[in-house]
Image (cartoon, rainbow, N blue to C red):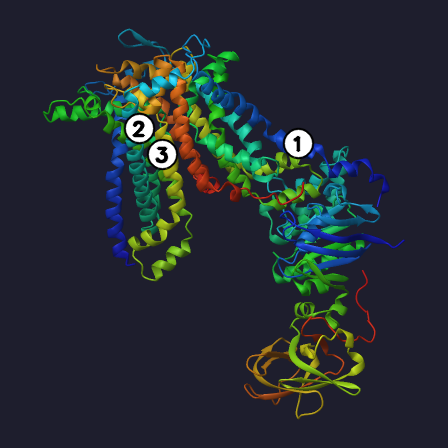
Amino acid sequence: MKHSRQGKKDKTDGDDLRRKLFPYKMLSPFFVLTGIFVAVPIILMIAISFSSMGLDLQWEFAGWSNYKRVLADSSIPIITLRTVLFVVICTVLSVLGSIFIALMTTYYLDIAYKRENAGLLFRIIWLIPSLTPSVVYVFIWRFVFGSNTQALINGVLDKLGIAPVTWLANYPMQILIFICCLSSASGSVILFASAIRQIPDNIIQAARVDGASNFYIMRKIIMPYLRWPITQKTLWSVLSFFCTYEIIMLLTAGGPGGKTTTFAYYIYKNAFELHKFGLGSALSVLLVAMSALIGLVVLRVTKVEKQLYPPRMDW
Amino acid sequence: MSDMMIRMQNISKSYDGEKTFVIRNLNLEIERGEFVALLGPSGCGKSTTLMMLCGLYRPTSGRIYFGDRLVNDVAPKNRNIGMVFQSYALYPNLSVYENIAFPLRQVKGVDKKTIDRKVREVAEIVKIEAFLERMPAQLSGGQQQRVAMSRALVKKPEILMLDEPMSNLDARLKLEIRDEIKKLQGELGLTAIIVTHDQEEAMAISGKIAVMEKGVIQQYAKPDELYEHPKNLFVASFIGTPPMNFIDGILERQGEEYVCRTPCGTLRIPAQSILEQGLKGSKVVLGIRPHNLHLVGGDTENCLGLRLDYVEHLGKDLLLKCHYGEEEGVRVLSGLSAGVHLREAVTVQVDSGSINVFDKESGENVTRFEEVTSHGTEG
Amino acid sequence: MKHEDKIKGAWKIFLFTEVASLVVVIPYGWMMVKAFTTPEGAFTLSNWSFLYQETPFFRGLVLPVIWPSVITSLIFASTTALLQIGVTIPTAYTISRMQFRGRVQLTKLMIILDAFPTVALLIGFFHVLNTIGLMNTYAGVVFVKVGMSLPGSIWLMKGFFDQVPWDIEWAAMVDGASRFTTFRKIIIAAVKPGSAVILVNSFLSGWAEYMLINLFIYSNGSTVSTFIGLMLDAEGKTAVPYGVMAAASLLYVLPVILLFIVSQKTLLKVSQGGSKQL
């Protein structure tokens, strides 16, 4: 052994400050970006909620007045209730719908009946809504449900001799729920489809050899495999419907008569249409508090510690 | 000063903050130029031991010396070692050439010409010159193994570490690669350590074997010594194919000899061949290799009565599977099967002096060995 | 199963799925038809005039030529994707494969942040961008957008890093590489499918971004999304030239669908890398 290697170099190999700092160096871009563009806005949100800031961005301490106004606002209970209903209905419909489509295209067409091409085609069709940019997505549906006879449904009704219906004015919430569900379900079909595809073939084959029907296999073998994706998708849907505002803004702008104003959209409206930044921030704090509750549930079911594997070396 | 290449002193290793230990108080010395195998079932700690030797893991306590240099905290790259992994661990995104050149490129100030020369040199030794431009995925298992070997050797290390290097190869290729590794190690004068769970491989390739179980070295000896005089029941059962037979017995001193009563017969063992102090009680386990049992016609000295279940052909020899009592099996290696019939009684004679006596309670070998004969391979 | 059953059953399921998918097919198909027809139903290419000239749209709104917007959108989406992957990869690697103080807490924080409603932060974004002088710049919007979507992509990417075998990393360490060199030269190559997923996803998300650009960039119609947004604002109680909107929408969606079909195999790996975790 060469003795010259002993000494300085060996010492630094062992207790190397650089080695201990290395993970933090790797994380630094994340820290910087998240710090400036997420952490600071969060702090600002809380700070602004105690001010009467408007578009002029002037800090003016307002104490609890924004929160008092929120509590006094008679529309808040209705908006909250509407938001809860919107979230629950959308979540249930979109999760059930996407499981159904995934089973149809992936289990029945691909696996049970060996029609892979048809399965793939339908999966791609079902994916299109989630790939569509929101402006186009909303345009398409405003076009379908438009009030004049140029629009799709009213055009057809006109040909049949039926008077046009102002769909978006009469059924704004129903339409909103429908298009939100469709876009969300569209995104989850692919998730469930690949969960189904990951089920080992031999399990299904074995069940089939044992004489199980397609429906039985679906219920007893496929569904248990989907438990975790379904949990995941449900929680994620709750969160995303809870925070939906872009589609509402583009489709109905919360109207008519505030019929489609959810909590998230109410924040947007106060902040960026009425330019009440202080009030908007107070509402935001409440929204964050509510979604943090869901976030905690997510954290519970995720079991972070179990998903962090210890590095398999001491360097 | 002794020419010890590697010394591990009182090494312990825990992965969970010293709640459980995978390695306990391990001591191991390896001489320069020796070929040592770490042998044991999976989970015995042999790989962990190797990982501490190569520096990827640090011991929780204890010291590791390479020569006179304490290497506990020395990075793997500064240990002058080459390593071959079970899965070969070839870099999938680099060509064979770049895989072999990778270790050289990590050293500052090595020019391209030198790298090229060294890569081609080692590729020639390991006979993969033809594949240098290919990607690892385009190679067969044996070729990948060779690439891994050349990558390990390209920096001319002093120590070569092999972690189950042949477990992914088919039987024939295994023998071929085994011979080549042995030959290379001798030619290059390397100190080599191989981790394996295959006792046959360990016996064939290495000059010394450390048999491990539950994080402890059970016996560290030359292959023939392990085979002839296993230190305890674990080593005895792990070494040798077909495995050693174990027969429970009660030992009783009768003058100048011990009488051992077993369910299938009584054996006499000279008193001087038993280490009396090792006996905790009268219950013992007799360990007898299948080739030390011989079919005999009648009942003579040192015989066991068995019942033949079936016969297995091993090529030159026959392996007779017998039993006594309820289910206890005994294997007998025999050149012929004349005069025996399936499901009938057979009598076998035991070579005197070939019996290993283990204390039933401690599992330790209590046989006194005349003289440790070593005609084993010298590294 | 008998062969006949197979045919019969398949036919039923096929028909059923086909009917169900009409919900998607009809509106999108209608949009395509509209892009090439006049309100009266005759074939025309005049809806596409924004490709080469300023086009009067509706009540005094004149649409500019669309190409500058397309280029801006492309640059915006590419920058978003590159920044996203550039920050995601080292962070995800560190969380997946290194031990450091605060590893668990950071991961938990990441999950909480992933659940954070963007709308609640809009006011804060506004203030921060204003303070550091990035208001009305695309750089500012890129930072905000990437900052919000990092937790999700890091968690997804972590799943890919988890699957890289350790022995490659061991071998590189023994071969003399530092952990950073190993990461840079070996490990990144091993998670290429994951990187592709993140790249494509964040490119698409950048390409589709409307809200942040609309809020933080003052000029109207500077990206394709806000270009269409202009028309969407005009649309309301009265009929607008649907054909023009359909044409612009088609132009906007086509690259998305093409990119998806090209990268379909890679994108489907999302589930393997990330979907096991939330």
Report which residue position mark 3 lands on. A238
Report which residue position mark 2 lands on. A83
Which comes sooner in the sequence, label 2 or label 3?
A: 2
| Res. C228 visible in picture | no
The label shown at residue C100 is none
- Along the viewing direction, whichever of A204 and A308 lies nearer the viewer: A308
Coordinates of residue C73 in the picture (x, y in percent):
43, 19
| Secondary structure at numbered mark 1 | helix
Q: Residue at x 65, y 54 (%)?
A: B22
Coordinates of residue B137 in the picture (x, y in percent):
58, 46
Report which residue position mark 1 lands on. A21
| Res. B102 visible in picture | yes
Task: Specify whether A295 is left or right of B159.
Answer: left
Q: Taking B257 as reference, is A177 above or below it?
A: above
**Is disc 3 in contact with disc 1, using a CB cutoff of under 8 Å?**
no
Looking at the rendered structure, the kind of residue marked 1 is Leu
Asked where in the image residue B110 lies, by quadrant, the reply is top right
